[in-house]
Image: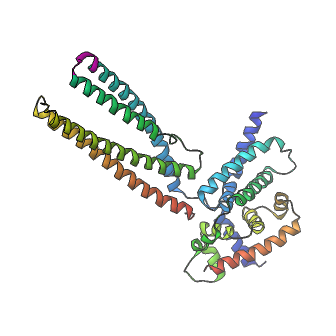
C-alpha cells in the first residue's frame, strides 16, 4: 500500500469516527416524552370530569324528577359514557413506546397523531349528531328556552367543539406529514 | 458481583459505545434498525459479561459480540440493498484521492454497507483503528486472512466509491 493510499485510509477512518448528527431523532424523542406526560394529565382530568358529569346528571335526575330533567340527564349520561368509552379505547397502546429506539418512538408519534385525528373526527361527528338532536327536540317538542342566551350558548358550545375538533385534526395531519419527512430522512441515513 | 458487572458494562459502553453504534449503523440499513441492533448488542453484552474471563481485551470482546449480533440481525432483516446506491450518488468529479477525502461520513457508511459481510467486517474494524492481530481475534480468523481480506475489501470499497462518482 502506498503512502497516498495510507493517507486516504486515515482520512476515511477520521470520517468514519465522526459523531453522528441526528437532530430529528432527538426531536422525536422529546416530542413523544412530552406527549406522554400530557396524555397522563389529560387522562386524569378526563376521569375527574367524567365522574363529576355523571354525578351531576344523576343528581339532576333524582332531584328534579320531571320528564325534561330525566331526558336531559339520561342524554348527558349517554354522552359522557360515549365520550369516556371512546377516549379509553382510543388511547389503548399509545401510552409508551415499545422500546427506546428511534424507530419505535417515531412509530408511536405517528400512531398518536392518527389517534388524535380519529378522536377529533369522532368528537366533531358526535357534536353534529347531538346538535341535530337538540335542534329537533327544541323544534319538535316546542321547548321554550329560558332566554335567547341559551340559544346562543348552544350554538357557541356545539360550534366551538366542532371548530376545535377540526383544528385538532388539521394539527395532527400536519404533524403526520412532518413525521413522514423525518422518517424518510432517517431511512435515507441522514 | 452485580455491581462489578454494572461498572464493567458502563466502562465498555463509555469507551466502545460510539464504535458499537457505528457498527450497528453498518449492519442495520436505517438508523431506526441501528437503534434496535444497538439495543440488542448492549443486551447481549450485558448477558455475556459473566462469561468474560479476560482472555482478550474488553474491546475485542465487545466487538466480537457486536459482529455476531450484527450478522444475526442482518440475516433476519434482509434489507433491500437495491435502494442504497441512490444514496451514494455524487455528481462532483475528481481524482480518486480527492473523492475519498471529500466523502462525508454517511456516504462512507453507505459504501461499507454495500460490501460483502466478510469484507465489511474487516473494513469496519480497521476503520475503528484495530490492528490486524485484534481483528483476527474478533473474527476468529488468522492475521494472514485478515490482511488478505482487508486488501481486497479496500479495493472493493475504492471501486464502489469510483462507481458512484
Q: Which of the image's four quarters has the N terminus of chain A?
A: bottom right
In the image, the segment drawn in magenta is A61-66
Residue furthest toward the top?
Answer: A63
The one of A168 and B44 positioned closer to us in this rendering: A168
The one of A76 and B110 positioned closer to us in this rendering: A76
Q: Percent from the top left, x then y, of residue B80?
A: 63, 67
Residue drawn at the location 69% of the way across and 66% of the way down: A13
Q: Is residue A80 left or right of residue A66?
A: right
Most common SS among magenta residues:
helix
Q: Quadrant of residue B136?
A: bottom right
A127 shown above or below A11: above
Does residue A63 show up magenta in the picture?
yes
Q: Is residue A54 left or right of residue A108?
A: left
A182 shown above or below B84: above
- Colour pattern of the rendering: rainbow
Q: Quadrant of residue B78?
A: bottom right
Count of numbered circles on the image: 0
Q: Percent from the top left, x then y, of residue A144?
A: 12, 30
B65 shown above or below B155: above
Residue drawn at the location 75% of the way across and 59% of the way down: B71
Residue drawn at the location 76% of the way across and 73% of the way down: B153
The one of A31 and B76 positioned closer to us in this rendering: B76
Q: Is residue A70 left or right of residue A83?
A: left
Q: Is residue A32 left or right of residue B42?
A: left
Q: Percent from the top left, x then y, of residue A183?
A: 51, 59
Does residue A177 show up magenta in the picture?
no
Q: Percent from the top left, x then y, of residue A157?
A: 23, 38
Residue drawn at the location 57% of the way across and 71% of the way down: B87
The one of A84 and B69 positioned closer to us in this rendering: A84
Amino acid at each position: 500500500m502506498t503512502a497516498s493510499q495510507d493517507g486516504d485510509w486515515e482520512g476515511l477512518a477520521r470520517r468514519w469516527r465522526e459523531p453522528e448528527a441526528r437532530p430529528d431523532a432527538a426531536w422525536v424523542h422529546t416530542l413523544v416524552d412530552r406527549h406522554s406526560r400530557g396524555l397522563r394529565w389529560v387522562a386524569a382530568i378526563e376521569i375527574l370530569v367524567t365522574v363529576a358529569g355523571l354525578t351531576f346528571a344523576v343528581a339532576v335526575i333524582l332531584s328534579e324528577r320531571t320528564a325534561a330533567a330525566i331526558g336531559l340527564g339520561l342524554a348527558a349520561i349517554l354522552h359522557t359514557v360515549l365520550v369516556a368509552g371512546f377516549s379509553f379505547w382510543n388511547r389503548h397502546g399509545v401510552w409508551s413506546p415499545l422500546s427506546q429506539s428511534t424507530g419505535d418512538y417515531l412509530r408511536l408519534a405517528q400512531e398518536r397523531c392518527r389517534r388524535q385525528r380519529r378522536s377529533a373526527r369522532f368528537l366533531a361527528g358526535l357534536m353534529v349528531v347531538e346538535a341535530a338532536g337538540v335542534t329537533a327536540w327544541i323544534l319538535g317538542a316546542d321547548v321554550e328556552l329560558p332566554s335567547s342566551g341559551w340559544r346562543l350558548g348552544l350554538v357557541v358550545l356545539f360550534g366551538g367543539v366542532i371548530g376545535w375538533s377540526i383544528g385538532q385534526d388539521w394539527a395532527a395531519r400536519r404533524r403526520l406529514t412532518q413525521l413522514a419527512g423525518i422518517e424518510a430522512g432517517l431511512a435515507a441515513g441522514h | 458481583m452485580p455491581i462489578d458487572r454494572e461498572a464493567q458494562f458502563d466502562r465498555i459502553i463509555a469507551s466502545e459505545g460510539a464504535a458499537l453504534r457505528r457498527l450497528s449503523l453498518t449492519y442495520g440499513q436505517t438508523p431506526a434498525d441501528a437503534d434496535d441492533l444497538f439495543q440488542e448488542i448492549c443486551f447481549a453484552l450485558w448477558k455475556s459479561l459473566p462469561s468474560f474471563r479476560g482472555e482478550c481485551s474488553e474491546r475485542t470482546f465487545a466487538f466480537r459480540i457486536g459482529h455476531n449480533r450484527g450478522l444475526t440481525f442482518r440475516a433476519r432483516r434482509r434489507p433491500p440493498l437495491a435502494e442504497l446506491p441512490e444514496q451514494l450518488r455524487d455528481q462532483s468529479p475528481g481524482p480518486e484521492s480527492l473523492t475519498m477525502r471529500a466523502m462525508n461520513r454517511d456516504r462512507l457508511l453507505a459504501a461499507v454497507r454495500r460490501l460483502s459481510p466478510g469484507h465489511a467486517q474487516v473494513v469496519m474494524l480497521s476503520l475503528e483503528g484495530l490492528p490486524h492481530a485484534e481483528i483476527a481475534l474478533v473474527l476468529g480468523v488468522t492475521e494472514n486472512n485478515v490482511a488478505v481480506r482487508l486488501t481486497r475489501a479496500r479495493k472493493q470499497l475504492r471501486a464502489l466509491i469510483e462507481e458512484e462518482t
